[in-house]
C-alpha cells in the first residue's frame, strides 16, 4: 500500500486520521486532569498542527491556552481558519526557553526508502526518512529547551518507527517516557508517549 493511501491525505494538508484521534484523546485527558486557575492556564504548543484538529480539541476541551505551529504554510492557514492562533515554525525553533507547559506532536514517521521520496507538503507530513525518525530526532534534541521545568511532551509514535528506539533516544536527551495509550491496526501499533524532563535535584 502506498504512503498516500495509508493516512488521511488531501493535496496540501494532512487531515485528521487515527493517529490524530489517539493523540488528541490522550492529550485532552491528561491536560484536563491538570488543575488550573484563571491566572495560571497551561500554555500548550502543538507542533505540526496540520488541519489544527488536535490543537482545536485541546482548545475546546481543556483550560489550556493553545498555540498551533507548522512548517507548512497551507496548514498554518487552515489552522487559522479554524480560529486557532497559528504560526509558521520549524519544530520548536522560534519558541522561548522554559516557556511551555506541554508540547504535543504527531510527527511524520513513516520509514521511506530514499528512492521513493517525493517532494511536496504531504511528503513532509508523512515521511520520517529512512528510519522514520528524521523529524523526531531534531525534535527530541530541542524540545527540552522550550519546556517549563514541570512540562511534558505528548508524542505519537508508531511501531513502524520503533517505539523502543524513540524511548531510548528520548532518554539520551534526559526524558523519562511513559506510554499513555496505544491502538493496533493491521500494519502498525500507534502509541502516545508522555516524555518528562529529568528533574535536577
Ligand atoms: C502526521 S502530520 C500531523 C498533522 C496533525 N497534527 C494531525 O495529527 O492530524 C505531521 C505534520 O507535521 C508537519 N511538519 C513536518 N515537519 C515539520 C517541521 N520540521 N516543523 C513543523 N512541522 C512539521 C507537517 O507539515 C504535518 O502537518
Image: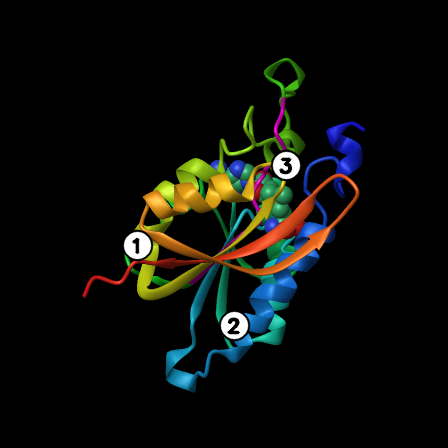
Task: Residue 68 in the image: state x and y as whole percent.
Answer: 52, 55
Q: Is residue 166 left or right of residue 3?
A: left
| Earlier residue among tags 3 and 1 | 1
**Disc 3 from disc 2: Cα separation:** 27 Å
- The residue segment tinted magenta is 102-112
Task: Residue 89 in the image: state x and y as whole percent.
Answer: 45, 43
Say if disc 1 is inside 8 Å of ligand 1: no
Q: How crowded is mark 1: few (under 14 residues within 10 Å), some or many (20 or more)?
A: few
| Secondary-structure class at tag 2 | helix
**Disc 3 from disc 1: Cα separation:** 32 Å
**Disc 2 from disc 1: Cα separation:** 21 Å
Q: Which quadrant would the N terminus be assigned to in this image?
A: top right
Residue sitting at x 30%, y 51%: 145
Disc nearest the viewer among 2 and 1: 2
| Earlier residue among tags 2 and 1 | 2
| Earlier residue among tags 3 and 2 | 2
Which dot marks residue 160? 3
Q: How crowded is mark 3: few (under 14 residues within 10 Å), some or many (20 or more)?
A: some
Extreme left residue here? 201
In the displayed structure, would residue 12 be above or below residue 150?
Answer: above
Q: Is residue 133 left or right of residue 169?
A: right
In the displayed structure, would residue 105 be above or below residue 133?
Answer: below
Kindly tell me whether residue 66 is visible in this rendering. yes
The residue tagged 1 is 96
Say if disc 2 is inside 8 Å of ligand 1: no
| Secondary-structure class at tag 3 | loop
Say if disc 3 is inside 8 Å of ligand 1: no
Amino acid at each position: 500500500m502506498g504512503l498516500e493511501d495509508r493516512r488521511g491525505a488531501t493535496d496540501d494538508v494532512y487531515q485528521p486520521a487515527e493517529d490524530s484521534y489517539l493523540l488528541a484523546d490522550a492529550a485532552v485527558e491528561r491536560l484536563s486532569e491538570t488543575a488550573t486557575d484563571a491566572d495560571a492556564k497551561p500554555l500548550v504548543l502543538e507542533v505540526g498542527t496540520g488541519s489544527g484538529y488536535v490543537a482545536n480539541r485541546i482548545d475546546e476541551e481543556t483550560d489550556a491556552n493553545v498555540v498551533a505551529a507548522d512548517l507548512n504554510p497551507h496548514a498554518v492557514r487552515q489552522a487559522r481558519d479554524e480560529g486557532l492562533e497559528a504560526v509558521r515554525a520549524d519544530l520548536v525553533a522560534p519558541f522561548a526557553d522554559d516557556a511551555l507547559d506541554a508540547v504535543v506532536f504527531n510527527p511524520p514517521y513513516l520509514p521511506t526508502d530514499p528512492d521513493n521520496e517525493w517532494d511536496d507538503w504531504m511528503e513532509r507530513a508523512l515521511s520520517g526518512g529512512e528510519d522514520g525518525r528524521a523529524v523526531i530526532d531534531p525534535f527530541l534534541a530541542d524540545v527540552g529547551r522550550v519546556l517549563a521545568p514541570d512540562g511534558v511532551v505528548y508524542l505519537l509514535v508508531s511501531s513502524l518507527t520503533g517505539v523502543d528506539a524513540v524511548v531510548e533516544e528520548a532518554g539520551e536527551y534526559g526524558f523519562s517516557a511513559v506510554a499513555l495509550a496505544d491502538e493496533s491496526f493491521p500494519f502498525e501499533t500507534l502509541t502516545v508517549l508522555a516524555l518528562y524532563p529529568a528533574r535536577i535535584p
